[in-house]
Image: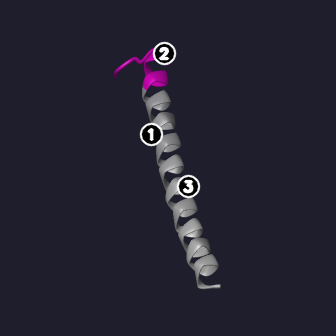
Amino acid sequence: MLACSPGAQSAPMANLAAVLKSEVGRLARNEVRAETEALKKTVAAQ
């Protein structure tokens, strides 16, 4: 059986948190970009 110290598991968890944070940020930027493009088209049509 492998023994893991508590500190050994914090690095992958920190990495997972960083990956999730960057992915959420990327998705949010894409959503904002899509919404602003739709708004620009609406304003330009008026």
Q: Which residue is more in the foreground, 24 or 45? A: 45
**Position of 41 compared to 46: left or right?**
left
Q: How many tags in the picture?
A: 3
Secondary element at tag 2: helix
Q: Assign the C terminus to one quadrant of the image.
A: bottom right
Above or below 21: residue 24: below
Of badges 1 and 3, the one in the foreground is 3
The x, y position of residue 2, in whole percent, is: 35, 20
Contact flag, marks 2 and 3 (Cβ < 8 Å): no
Q: Distance between the residues labelled 1 and 3?
A: 14 Å
As rendered, which of 8 and 33 lies closer to the eye? 33
Image quarter where the N terminus lies is top left
Q: Which amino acid does label 1 sit on?
A: Val
> For numbered disc 3, what is the local secondary structure?
helix
Q: What is the magenta range? A: 1-11
The residue at the point 49 percent across, 28 percent down is 14
Residue bearing the label numbered 1 = 19
Of pointers 2 and 3, the one earlier in the residue sequence: 2
Q: Residue at x 52, y 54 (%)?
A: 29
Left or right of residue 1, residue 12 in this image: right
Separation of residues labelled 2 and 1 (CA atoms): 19 Å
Q: How crowded is mark 3: few (under 14 residues within 10 Å), some or many (20 or more)?
A: few
| Eye-nearest disc, 2 or 3 | 3
Check residue 21 for magenta coloring: no
Labelled disc at residue 7: 2
Residue closest to the far left: 1
For the residue pair 43 and 4, the one nearer the viewer reads as 43
Amino acid type indicated by mark 3: Ala
Q: Earlier in the sequence, mark 2 or mark 1?
A: 2
Residue pointed to by mark 3:
28
Do residues under tags 1 and 3 come within 8 Å of each other at their CB atoms? no
Where is residue 8 shown, x and y percent of the image? 43, 18
